[in-house]
Structures are given as structure tokens and as C-alpha cells.
Image (tube, rainbow, N blue to C red):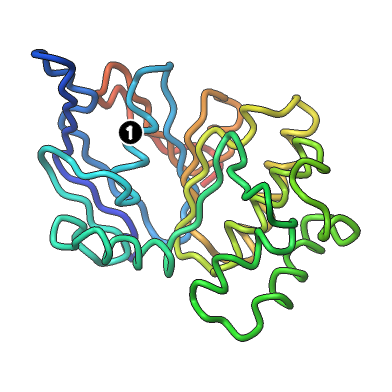
Amino acid sequence: MTKILKINGLEKTYKSGSKELTVLRDISLDIEKGQTFSIVGPSGSGKTTLLGLAAGLDTPNAGTVELCGHDLNTLNEDQRAQLRNEKVGFIFQDFQLLPTLTALENVSVPLELQSAKNAVDRAKELLEKVGLADRMHHYPSQLSGGEQQRVAVARAFSNGPSILFADEPTGNLDEETGEKVIQLLFDLNEQAGTTLVIITHDLDLAARTQRILRLKGGKVLTYETTAAI
């Protein structure tokens, strides 16, 4: 099968004063197109750093990342941004909706960046799919946490991404609301055939994905296939 993400020998070090802090050491993995994949580990294990490197939001000190057939080391910042706009979706723990835009406008933004002619119609369709047909003209401050995350889910799928990164998508939600959002995420993902990569502390959520990478202290602890495959 086609490998949509290939990471080899990845390392990331940050300078803190005169000291260096190595956050990731010799990380290698590959993710196939259409696969569901989770990255788990305790706080400080390097999960979010790995996501940032995999999506081209940051650059490694060593190693390579090939995303959707592109070696990120060979791309400049603008080229990486264009690749993300065209191929990548994101969902964050804190929603990251633009507060001055309505739900509809928030979902339309990635489509408008691509100059899509049917941006508003596509955004409306996605908001209907996530159960917010009657809330699309509300601003984030007028929505509950669960509703805001559903807007974020709709936005993440709006540009028809090849791969979607979800960083602790239920971290700010209660258990019941979080379960609804996750079910929605998996349902939309299956419909779209997107590759889904979830960063999570939740081992029950991780077990619903086909493969799990466990990190500890910036190193790979285990790399396993689950019954979900």
C-alpha cells in the first residue's frame, strides 16, 4: 500500500540557555494511506513535537519526513505551508477557531485559501454532517465546547485532506461529549477515506485505531497493530 507518511531517524533538540534538551531520539515510523494511527505516551514524551515535525510545522535536527510523497527537508516554509493547505487537516485540543468568524466562516476559510468556488456550500454541508445546521451563523463564544470541536472537525475535513492530525481532540471535553466527537471523527474519516493520526493520552481511544506508537522519554517504546485492523 501507499505510504502517506514516512519518518526515518527523526531527532529534535531544543536549546535552553547553555543546555540542550533532546525531545525526540531516532524516531522511525510509516503510515499507510487510509490508515488510522495513534501516538500515545505521558506528558513530555514528545507526542506533540512529533506531530509538528510530521506535519511540517517544525524542522528536525536530524532525520527525514516524507509527507504525501514530498520530502519536507527539501521544501521551504512557503512550500510546506502550501502542502498543508492542500493535503493536511488539523484538530486541536483548544479548538483554535477564529473568534471573529461564525462557524460557517471558520469552516469556509481553508476552502477559500484554495480559491474553491463552492466554499460556502461545502462548509454548510459539513456543518450539517456534524449536526450544526442550526448553529452555523453563531460565533465560537456562542457555542459550547463540544459544538466548537464539531466545527473544528468540519473545518479539518473541508479541504478534503489526505491526512488529518488530531492533537488530544477530546482533551477539553467531558467524557460523553468527547465520545460523540470521536464517533463523528471516525465516521467522517471513513466516509472520506482520510488517513487519521491521533495524539492522545486515552488508551481506549488509541485502541480504536489500527496501529499505536507508544513514546516514552522521546523514544519509541512500542509500535503495535491493534484488533481494529
The residue at 33%/26% (across/down) is 46
- Residue 146, placed above or below residue 161: above
In which image quadrant can residue 135 be found? bottom right
Q: Tally the numbered discs.
A: 1
Towards the viewer: 105 or 50 = 105
Quadrant where the image shows the N terminus: bottom left
The residue at 51%/50% (across/down) is 90
List the single residue furthest toward the right.
Answer: 134
Q: Is residue 197 left or right of residue 66?
A: right
In which image quadrant can residue 220 be found? top left
- Residue 207 at what x, y percent from top left? 55, 33
Q: Is residue 84 left or right of residue 21?
A: right
Q: Secondary structure at mark 1?
A: helix
Towards the viewer: 141 or 159 = 141
Q: Amino acid at mark 1?
A: Thr
- Residue 175 at what x, y percent from top left? 75, 25
List the single residue furthest toward the bottom.
Answer: 117
- Residue 145, placed above or below residue 65: above
The residue at 34%/61% (across/down) is 81
- Residue 197 at what x, y percent from top left? 46, 46
Q: Which residue is mark 1?
A: 49
The residue at 45%/65% (across/down) is 162
In which image quadrant can residue 224 be found? top left
Judge the density around disc 1: few (<14), some (14-19), many (≥20) Cα neighbours within 10 Å. Answer: some
Towards the viewer: 110 or 216 = 110
